[in-house]
Amino acid sequence: MQILTVAERVISQIFRDKRTIAMMFLAPLFVLFLLSTILGSSSDDVTIGTVDVPSAFADTLASKTETQSFKTEAEGMDAINDQRIEALITYQNGQPEILIEGGDVSKNAAALQVIQETLITIQGQQATATNTKLSETVKQLQQRLTELTNQTFDAPSPVVPPTAKPDIQFLYGSPDAELFDQIAPALMGFFIFLFVFIIAGVSFLRERSSGTLERTLATPLKRSSIVFGYFVGFFLFVTIQTILIQLFIVNVLNVTQEGNYFLLLFVNLLTASVALSLGLLLSSFSRTEFQLIQFIPLAIVPQIFFSGLFDLTDAPTWVEVINRLMPLTYAADALQNIMIRGAGFTDIWIDLIVLTGFMTLFVLLNMRALKKQRPV
Amino acid sequence: MIDVTHYSQTFGKRTVLSDVQFSIGQGEIVGLIGPSGSGKTTLIKSLIGLQQPTTGTIMVLGTKQPSLAQAENIGYMAQSDALYEDLTARGNLRYFGKLYGLKKARLRARIETVLEFVDLKKDADRPIHQFSGGMKRRLSLAIALIHEPSLLLLDEPTVGIDPALKKTFWHEFEQLRQSGVTVLVTTHVMDEAERCDRLLLIQHGRLIEAGTPDDLIQRFGSIDEAFIQKERV
Ligand SMILES: Nc1ncnc2c1ncn2[C@@H]1O[C@H](COP(=O)(O)OP(=O)(O)OP(=O)(O)O)[C@@H](O)[C@H]1O
Ligand SMILES: [Mg+2]
């Protein structure tokens, strides 16, 4: 009962602060929209310059990307220096020589891929041509043999190299899934973490400095009830936030969502609980709101690096250790597995247990910190 | 009601109160006086159970403090108004009333009664950040009274309140005393000290039973002198 009384008060306080409400609900949508647009607008279209290349090569290349042919190598060099083309191909003694511009990582990769594809196609064509020639020669020889000896000779037909395309299928997701689909779930977790941390932390700090915390603790309220009251109050906002973000990224930004919405909500509530208990805890180490905000670059921002945005397979051990210590690592993992791979409870239970562990630890530390305010 | 024996309070190396000893019976209005920084608020906080006494025992209503058990029998008015600024007066009263365990009908009735008493009826639905200092003070008193406690601990309740309302306050305190409520009130103001049944004076970390206001005046000439002539204590 006392928990609900505290929750009700927390809720009505936040609802009276219209700007906080707007920030909490609209800011994540705006940032997600912005990021989705930015990631969607980077193009991998490349222009490749050629100087005096065989026509078969030039045709194949032109069928794959935009090309520009130059009369002299010097002209080509000018173009690549001005970044009008991403790569320049010249032929020396029948061998292609490739010069890559090298300034834009993703475009260079795209250029390399196109060139390699072209070379493979050309080789395939050459092989087929050789094969055809070979078969014809064999056939002619057979005919000659029949004419000369009246004997038929069975020659094995030449081996044709397999040119069949590999059949590629996606276990999860689809070929047109973009980077944004991968980071959207993690970002959702990050926003919930950030907003709950800031709003809960600042509210609690204000209670501490205005004396309302002490006044509340002078009533028969149990220390734990105030912490759990905050939990329940913030659950309402996190639920609304989750619904809004989900509706937005699935329907407007067309992000893949394969999983169960209730499980997703559950993970978000758990993430929020961790953020909330951390916010309350760090607020007891701060005298002012300014000091609390100073924790953000240290405690919150690095978490975004570990939320699945970057692949950490080759990261040094100490980074891996930090990774394991960040609550958002587990939240992001669970959210990504639910949304991209349609994971169920049994697939992500380890993440959930770790998050619960963080929450329990922070809550216990909070109780200890509150003991200073009310020993019993 | 209150029994304090050999109580001392230390913050770090600083001893604020040492070997404090006194008791207060039911239905008394006791004034706690002493210079600024002498430890009045510290003593009140220990009586509620907001801090652990460094040594000694504090018994309130038969329970050793700190405890949660007696919180619902104590009405507390902190020195600085601890109010939720973005809630209304009614919202604050509802919140604290519920925490003290008041149920629907009684809660509603009590809210109206205390609002009436502190003369905040017509401002009851305004948010606190629009309130004047005196209005906040009155609301704090209303919160202290909401659950009809049998012990009132009031830390400078009349700071920033106009003389007319101050009079009503003291009239109410005396009425509460008639119904058996015990009141411990800290004050710097002499006319208030004179209205107490008994005075406790804190000086140099010691608490002195100063007896009735008349006793104090006999001893020091006037209550003001009691503050000034520290050396005679
Ligand atoms: N939590 C604390 N930590 C350290 N020192 C404290 C703490 N609380 C109070 N003190 C010190 O104890 C002394 C007594 O403070 P207290 O607030 O009890 O004074 P007071 O008698 O209420 O004064 P005033 O009349 O100005 O309200 C002060 O010197 C104060 O600095
Ligand atoms: Mg004081």
Image (cartoon, coloured by chain):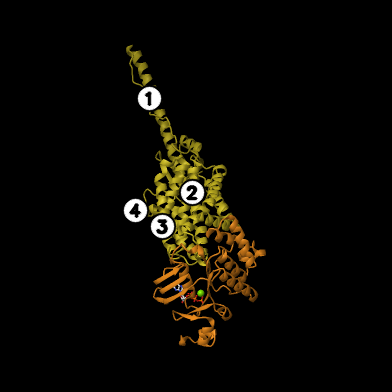
Chain colours: A yellow, B orange
Please report whichever mark, 1 or 3, sits nearer to the chain's N-terminal start: 1
Q: Nearer the viewer, mark 3 or mark 2?
A: 3
Please report whichever mark, 3 or 2, sits nearer to the chain's N-terminal start: 2
Please report whichever mark, 4 or 2, sits nearer to the chain's N-terminal start: 2
Quarter of the view holding residue B52: bottom left
Q: Callout 1: residue from which chain?
A: A
User: How far across and down, in percent of the image, does residue B17 sit?
Assistant: 43, 76
Q: Farthest residue to the top: give it.
A: A150
| Numbered disc 3: secondary structure | helix
Please report whichever mark, 1 or 2, sits nearer to the chain's N-terminal start: 1
Which residue was labeled with disc 1?
A134
Q: Is residue A338 left or right of residue A237?
A: left
Give me the disc on residue A268.
Answer: 2
User: How far across and down, in percent of the image, does residue B26 sit?
Assistant: 51, 71
Q: Farthest residue to the right: give it.
A: B122
Q: Is mark 1 within 8 Å of ligand 1?
A: no
Separation of residues labelled 1 and 2 (CA atoms): 66 Å
